[in-house]
Amino acid sequence: MGQLTGRAYVTIAGKRMASKEGAKLGFGNPERTAELGDSGVLGYKEKPTVPFVECSIAHSADTSLQELADMVDVVVSFDTDTKKSYVLRNAWCAKALELDKGEVALRFEGMSCEEV
């Protein structure tokens, strides 16, 4: 067995973020739930989900909360240390930003996510 994913690098609008451990990627694939009937499982139903990237970044003198909050229609890259990369397209800052203990939690949602 080879290397397992342990680290992720987040780039937003061409700028590498100082992301902390624990970044998350939501691929945006359909969520499937079982449909039950009197005789058991009848099948499943699908509902769409929103592709997203979440991370916390270290705040520094170079961090502009206003710039991050205003971002719409940007590309967000999620690159792993196992050489897998994912691109969130037409993304926007989806969460109100809060600076807490030197960190800012970010959530970007987009129209699509692709493995590249």
Image: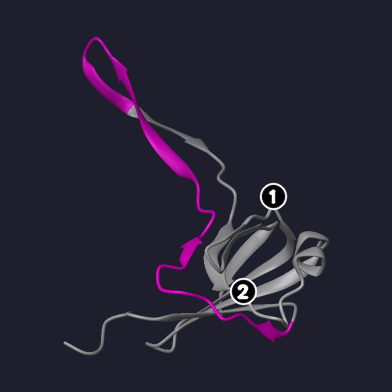
Label 1 Cα neighbours within 10 Å, binned few <14 / some 14-19 / many ≥20: few
Q: Which residue is mark 1?
A: 96
- Of labels 2 and 1, earlier in sequence is 2
Q: Quadrant of residue 108?
A: bottom right
Left or right, residue 35 beside residue 23: left
Say if 27 sits above or below 15 in the image.
above
Q: Residue furthest front?
A: 101
Instruction: Count how many numbered circles sit on residues in the image.
Output: 2
Q: Is residue 22 magenta?
A: yes
- Residue 59 vs residue 73, the one in the foreground: 59
Of circles 2 and 1, the one toward us is: 2
Which residues lie in the magenta part?
Answer: 14-42
- Residue 115: image location, x then y, percent: 53, 74
Residue at 21% in and 19% down:
40
Residue 99 in picture, x, y percent from top left: 62, 60
Residue occupying image coordinates x 52% and y 76%:
19
Q: Mark 2 highlights which residue? A: 59
Q: Answer whether residue 16 is magenta in the image.
A: yes
* Dot 2 amino acid type: His
Q: Quadrant of the C terminus?
A: bottom right
Residue sitting at 41 percent across and 73 percent down? Answer: 21
Secondary structure under tag 2 reads loop
Q: Is residue 97 left or right of residue 38?
A: right
23 versus 77 height, above or below = above
**Which circle marks residue 82 in the picture?**
none
Q: Amino acid at mark 1?
A: Ala
Give the secondary structure at mark 1.
loop
Left or right of 62 in this view: 56: left
Write the residue at 16% across / 87% down. 1
